[in-house]
Amino acid sequence: MNPSRRLGKLKAAALKRLGRLRSRVSGLSFPVGPNDDISVAWVTVEALNLWGGFLRAYYLSGAISCRTASGKPVKFVVFKFPNMEAALKFAAHSAKGGKVPGKVSRRDEPAWHDAKVFLKLEKSVGASNLAQIYAAFGIATPFTEYLSIVRNFYAHRCDETARKAARVGVKLGLSTKPELRPTKILCSKLPKRPQNVLTDWIDDMSNIIDVLCS
């Protein structure tokens, strides 16, 4: 996902991709077949990639000065960067806690999907719309904490990632013991919810993106 001087454009691109992901899993409920399990795995990995890519593009859009969908200007008032490369170097420096030599690689960059890392970075550069950013992340949702955990299971599929993913089911109240498989967790419905957990998370992500860019 690319930075833009128009956050409305960034928002539209993100929501369009999220809509495609949502359509793959919104009708699923457990038990699911092998093809559905593959869809859940793919959507989970892609959703986290999209989320991290969006927050990276959002930060860089602010670095080059941009406007929200409503026309409000967004800029950094504490640190100002001559270009996106300088902004990335600052972000990498902040993430690593030390000097980053030479050209910044993606490995040097922050874990963009981590909401705490993103919020700390936006605060440190003095984003002019910081109140709007905090309002967006004030939306109550567990996906910012748990999506990366279940994504790691699908990406690595080992005992350790399986154990961590199973604990998500306990934290969501779907089980009293860490025994549920990740696909069952994501395809289950929480009390009083009309759709599965993964669809809820995609909708929550869409809502945060909407507030961030509006």
Image (cartoon, rainbow, N blue to C red):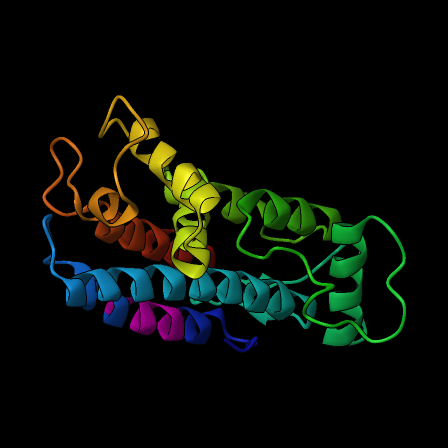
Write down the quadrant of residue 142 in the picture.
top left
- Span colored in magenta: 12-19
Between 67 and 50, the one lying in front of the other is 50
Q: Is residue 185 magenta?
A: no
Residue 173 placement, left or right of 77: left
Query: Total label count?
Result: 0
User: Which residue in the rendered view is the most extreme toward the front?
Assistant: 159
What is the x, y in percent for residue 100? 86, 63
Write down the quadrant of residue 80 in the picture.
bottom right
Residue 144 seen in the current view: no
Say which residue appears at 63% left-offset and 47% top-offset. 117
Between 111 and 161, the one lying in front of the other is 161
Say which residue appears at 11% left-offset and 60% top-offset. 33
From the image, give the main secondary structure of the stretch colored magenta. Answer: helix
Say which residue appears at 67% left-offset and 57% top-offset. 110
What is the x, y in percent for residue 91? 74, 59
Between 87 and 78, the one lying in front of the other is 87
